Amino acid sequence: MISLSGLTKEFPGGVRAVDSLDLEIGDGEFFALLGPSGCGKTTLLRSIAGLETPTSGKIRIGGVDVTASPPGRRDVAMVFQDYALFPHMDVTSNIAYPLRIKKVSRQRREAKAAETASRLSLSDLLARRPAQLSGGQQQRVALARAIASRPQVFLFDEPLSNLDARLRLEARTFLKRLQRELAVTTVFVTHDQGEALALADRIAVMNAGRIMQVGTPSEVFHRPTDPFVAGFIGSTPMNLLPASAEGGRLHVAGAVLPLPRDVADGPLVYGLRPEYADLSQSAPVGRRDVFSGKVAVVENLGTAHLVTLDSGDLLIQVVVPEGDEPAVGASAWAVPRPGRALLYRDDRLLTGA
Ligand code: ATP
């Protein structure tokens, strides 16, 4: 449905906000662009919308080359972070605006606006202006406006970022259901990895204008192909520790672990999610495959605690169930669960350990 090839956007001053991107987004897919601030997500979305002119490369929507087409010719609807509602128009006129541009008759566009408004539980608010609405209601009006125009593609730029934490969760569920119902191809920009994992069919993780990995939420979470993605995805970041393979053993932060057979000797990065280790408060007898340290920090996550162990020259984090958290300053041992670690060499995923 959306195909990008060699897409590059350079701003004056030499900033390459988007750097030779290739990407295919399928029909009806809910696709997230995820990455840290400044990695080029918004520039990429605005390029698809036609609000930025690429320096080079091609954009196709539904098989048609739209690289040089103005926004109005692309059959896309964009919802911005600040909703961009017209302050002087009531809810009906805001929702019906794209239809007015398409020269749909007044009667038909008001009927369409009323129907879309009812779908988004806005029927009681039709006569209000944006200033008389809450943030969540404004967001639904912006969505209704996008939906009413029945585009081929929805483009969302952090549409949930102005909502408080609870409303944001509600809006997320609502948005997912709505996208399923409408089955419109949707590209969604976010810097919130939890939001991308929860909403998207597939995620592109971006860094410095480039795509580091494209995959399903499960793929980018369980098989991040490089340490950047590994460190970015997950509500508690993955432990990424310098390691080395020597004589068939893996040496990491004082621990000696079994080495998968196909890994050659040399330096590695050992990746382990804090959820995939258990914490022992007594020394596991006769075992070298554990990380020992002093408890430096204990953070309350609600139903669990995040414990940071100081092993002398490295920090290792472990999630422990509520009630099992150790005292700060105590000695503790992190026991990695077998088969859960990932090994990286030269920034590339080798295998699990
Ligand atoms: P955020 O999550 O903070 O919105 P982002 O990933 O959406 O960030 P972009 O807004 O696409 O990032 O910006 C990518 C890079 O391009 C940044 O370094 C930014 O400073 C630069 N940039 C964006 N717009 C312009 C512009 N109009 N002129 C010059 N540089 C720009």
Image: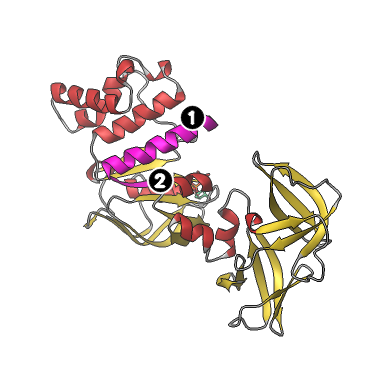
Residue 12 forms part of the magenta stretch: no
Q: Does residue 47 appear in the picture of this structure?
A: yes
Q: Amino acid at mark 2?
A: Phe
**What residue is disc 2 on?**
188
Check the image and report above or below for 269 versus 168: below
Of residues 30 and 157, the one drawn nearer to the viewer in this rendering: 30
| Magenta stretch bounds | 163-187
| Quadrant, the C terminus | bottom right
Of residues 17 and 22, the one drawn nearer to the viewer in this rendering: 22
**What residue is disc 1 on?**
167
Residue 176 forms part of the magenta stretch: yes
Residue at the far front in the pictured view = 285
Q: Earlier in the sequence, mark 1 or mark 2?
A: 1
**248 sits to left or right of 7:** right
Q: Residue at x 74, y 55 (%)?
A: 279
| Secondary structure at numbered mark 1 | helix
**342 sits to left or right of 132:** right
Q: Position of residue 21 (x, y in %)?
A: 41, 61
In the rendered image, which quarter is residue 106 located in? top left
